[in-house]
Image (spheres, rainbow, N blue to C red):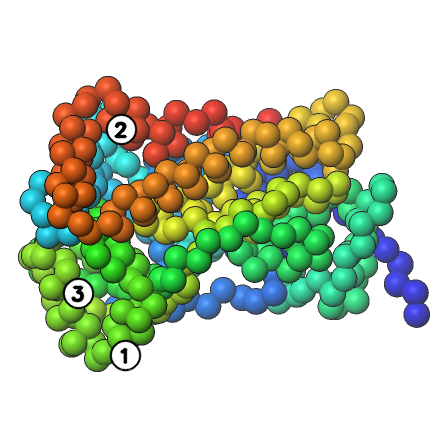
Amino acid sequence: MNIKPEQVDLVIVGGGMVGLMLAAALRHSGLHIVVVERAIYQPVRSLGLDCRVSAIVQGNVNILKSVGVWQYLQGKVGEMTAMQILDGQEQGGLHFEALEIGEDKLGVLLENQHFIEALHDTMHENSCVELLCPEKVESVVWKRSHVEVLLSSGRKLHTPLIVGADGGHSWLRQQAGIDVFSRDYAQKGIVATVKPRFSHQYVAMQRFLSSGPLALLPMKGDMCSIVWSATNDRAYDLLALSDEAFQYELNLEVGGVFGGIVEVGSRAAFPLKAQLARHMVRSRLALIGDAAHSIHPLAGLGVNLGIRDAMVLAQEITDARKFDEDYGDMDVLNRYMKQRMPDVLATMASMEALHRTFKVQLPAWIQLRGFGMKALGNAGIIKQLLMKNSTGINLSVPHTIE
């Protein structure tokens, strides 16, 4: 039986945070948008919270406010007004305060479940956006003028542009024959919710250990989310421990920050890799988020890159329509790619440099790192510039789509 194709304006494969962000940004554009997601998000509970957490930098908080997502997140975020970076158990380190750059916070911490729910609420403000979940793409065929998309439900869609927002193992990227540059850190990131003895006072802590960085991120209600990047062997041992034994090991590394940890929740872990798609765009295809690039989570910037991808692509699609351009054409998609690559490459390079810098544990190198951190802490203008760039405040990314 021949299935009659249905003409739609945009198909987004992947209904995670980045794919939903693109749909939310375009919800008032008049486009018929179809978001295809394989599975309903299932939070992993840890002390009652989703242990998968996203750190959203202040520049992207401003984007969420402008797009209209923020109204659905009121009262659900943990604020981060300062960050302390420590080199192992060494004294000193770096301290960043939001007030140094004229902001009230450096960013916020969101449970992924709450972020996804807020994006759903935003999308549903307009009936032009369809979210199909659970649903998957069975096949995709690129034609000169459109893309043919067959869904497992039997629907056949024709669209001028398909967007891959389906994560680091992107099925759509593989169907397009796009390879990736990859870097395996031979580490796992252990995540959990923990309760410190004292209030975190909205301060995030990042301690660089010999086995990998450990972050304590301030959540709502004086809870903290941890992201403990450890070598595979070390991570395997930590995951096998009882809650009490894990809490003991964690306190050894926390070093008394926030008075130590008095309770730990369920743990989850994921392998740490960095990768970059060899092509972010092909004719009638754009990749965003982890489908295009993924980085080490030591600074929590991965989803922030994806949010900026979504906003820039949304603006390019909108601008192309104003001038009657085909937004699936390479001329338009190359504009998206050229805008995003400097931010992506700079962030990936800085994360790799940071990882390599703190990985070396030779005494002389540790001493040199200490001098460097002290110098940066005293370099007012340079420090402010670094903070503004890392929080996304200086980046020329659209905050609204017009």
316 up-or-down from 6: above or below: above
Q: Quadrant of residue 50?
A: bottom left
The amino acid on which the numbered mark 1 sits, given as a three-letter code, is Ala
- Residue denoted by label 1: 240
Q: Which quarter of the rendering shows the N terminus?
A: bottom right
* Residue occupying the point 34% across, 68% down: 232
Q: State whether residue 80 appears in this view.
A: yes
Instruction: Indicate which label's residue lies in the foreground, 3 or 2.
Output: 3
202 and 189: which one is in front? 189
Q: Picture coordinates of residue 127 (x, y %)?
A: 65, 48
Q: Quadrant of residue 137?
A: bottom right
- Residue denoted by label 2: 103
The amino acid on which the numbered mark 3 sits, given as a three-letter code, is Leu
Q: Picture coordinates of residue 260 (x, y %)?
A: 9, 60
Q: Residues within 10 Å of mark 1 (few under 14, many from 20)?
A: few
The first of marks 3 and 1 along the sequence is 1
Q: Which quarter of the rendering shows the C terminus?
A: top right
* Residue occupying the point 18% across, 49% down: 362
* Residue occupying the point 53% across, 56% down: 168
* Residue occupying the point 50% across, 44% down: 306
- Secondary structure, mark 3, is helix
How far is the residue under mark 1 from the one under mark 2? Answer: 42 Å
Task: Report whether 187 appears left or right of 290.
Answer: left
Q: State whether residue 129 appears in this view.
A: no
- Residue denoted by label 3: 250
21 up-or-down from 66: above or below: below
The amino acid on which the numbered mark 2 sits, given as a three-letter code, is Glu
Q: Check contact, mark 3 vs mark 1: CB within 8 A.
A: no
